[in-house]
Image (cartoon, coloured by chain):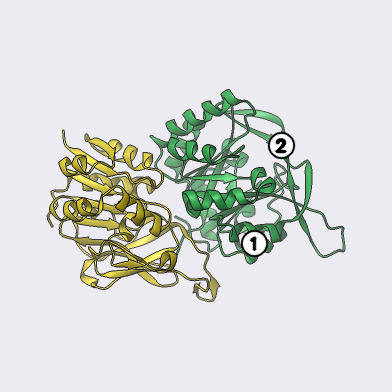
Amino acid sequence: MQTIAVIDYGMGNLHSVGKALEHVGSTRVQITSDPQVIRDADRVVLPGVGAMRDCMAEMQRFELLDVIREVSQDRPFLGICVGMQALLDSSEENGGVPCLGLFPGQVRYFGQNLQIDGERLKVPHMGWNTVEQRLDHPLWHNIPDQSRFYFVHSYYVQADNQRQVAGSCEYGLPFAAALADGPCFAVQFHPEKSHTNGLQLLQNFVAWDGRW
Amino acid sequence: MTLAKRIIPCLDVENGRVVKGVKFENIRDAGDPVEIARRYNEQGADEITFLDITATLEGRDTMLQTVERMASQVFIPLTVGGGVRTVNDIRNLLNAGADKVSINSAAVFTPEFVQEAAQRFGSQSIIVAIDAKQVSAVGEPPRWEIFTHGGRKPTGIDAVEWAKKMESFGAGEILLTSMDQDGMKNGFDLGVTRAVSDAVNIPVIASGGVGNLQHLADGILLGKADAVLAASIFHFGEYTIPEAKAYLASQGIVVR
């Protein structure tokens, strides 16, 4: 049976991600902070909630930075929410935090004056929004374009390389909802909380060989 | 591409069973929470809220088991509230599979608890529940105050000012219940809903008083709520979630 490592660096609820992965495939899900267990896994998920400074500090404390850089390049890898944002160059959150730099770009704050057609938009961006699929990618298999996914975030990804933007979303401004590079895929929304479409994406991830 | 307004069925859970009272009394039994949550999930509910109204410690453990059972079967966001008093309560609920917890009385008694919780678990997982009642007399400018103990105890705290303070303390969302309207089926208190929603920059969930689908639309269009929460109109089969969504869509509201 194949194994999936869900990286646990002490930030938030990993139960849902684990349960959702178990629900979609016959896989052994290991929630772990052990670099060796992560290296031994067939595929790896990097979830994340909370503040970026704490996330990066905890990843460092658990000595996970090198193993994340490594496994995100050589096997199917999925970053979720702050686990996506951590893959960019840096984040504006907490006065500026350097991140892993696996995707060129920045993580920026939505701001307090976000508007659409004169209507003020609340921050965090919380709820179900549509994702436009910008790449033909195996992780979108069986998911209709413009499907809605569940988001909750106050910071967004501004990708420098538009060819890596697998899905885009808009909330007062356009932002990257999904990034893809080699065997690494990352989403701003929560597939584990996005009902049918989210479970389909996780199922696609479990079946993916990392190529496209 | 627009963010959809959310419809959130709320389950009042006591000792592992769903109940719903009228003005917090006359409780009727409405079934197994996980079963009902699954039904709402299949119908397209945008989130689920469990409100634990159990008083006993044994009941608290039952709630954690219920949350765990729900979280391994229903893959939409789950909020749990009721009796959340310590960082440990929050951790237990999040570990059991809740995505957000709502803090009510404990925030009133110790506002710094909200700060601590938001720092520890992130604002996205901390909702502050506000139970408000209108206290201004007829003819006066409207004013609402926070009440605790199921709407029985006034606190002297202004509801709108309180919402702003909770936002500054790190709350990610406000769950606003009108105690005048709760269980009455006359619609939300649109005045307080609008006042709070205009005053804060975080999402506001309107609650208390939904009796028909127009009430849901009014909460969004007139109360400017980002989400609407209702219990009895869904539990007792008066309306389904798809009916509610179709109605909101017919009023020009974006729904999932």
Query: What colour is chain A?
Result: yellow
**In screen coordinates, is B240 left or right of A55?**
right
Q: Residues within 10 Å of mark 1 (few under 14, many from 20)?
A: some
Examine the rendered structure and indicate whether residue B159 appears above or below residue A173: above
Q: Chain of mark 1?
A: B
Label 2: which residue? B22
Examine the rendered structure and indicate whether residue B74 appears above or below residue B171: above
Give the alpha-carbon distance from disc 2 to disc 1, as whole Å.
29 Å
Tell me the SS state at disc 2. Answer: strand
Give, as a three-letter code, the residue at label 2: Val
Q: Residues within 10 Å of mark 2 (few under 14, many from 20)?
A: some
Quarter of the image for residue A145 reads bottom left
Question: Which of pointers 2 and 1 indicates the residue nearer the eye?
Answer: 1
Q: Which chain is green?
A: B
Quarter of the image for residue A88 reads bottom left
Quarter of the image for residue A35 reads top left
Does any portion of residue A141 appear in the rendered image? Answer: no
Q: Residue at x 52, y 48 (%)?
A: B243
Give, as a three-letter code, the residue at label 1: Lys
The image quadrant where one finds the N terminus of chain A is top left
Q: Chain of mark 2?
A: B
Label 1: which residue? B164
Q: Quick one: label 2 or label 1, which is nearer the N terminus?
A: 2
- In the rendered image, residue B186, in percent from the top left (x then y), is placed at 72, 49
Q: Nearer the viewer, residue B80 or B74?
A: B80
**In screen coordinates, is A110 left or right of B179?**
left
Q: Residue at x 71, y 36 (%)?
A: B24
Q: Nearer the viewer, residue B9 or B154?
A: B154
Examine the rendered structure and indicate whether residue B34 appears above or below residue A41: above
The image quadrant where one finds the C terminus of chain A is bottom left
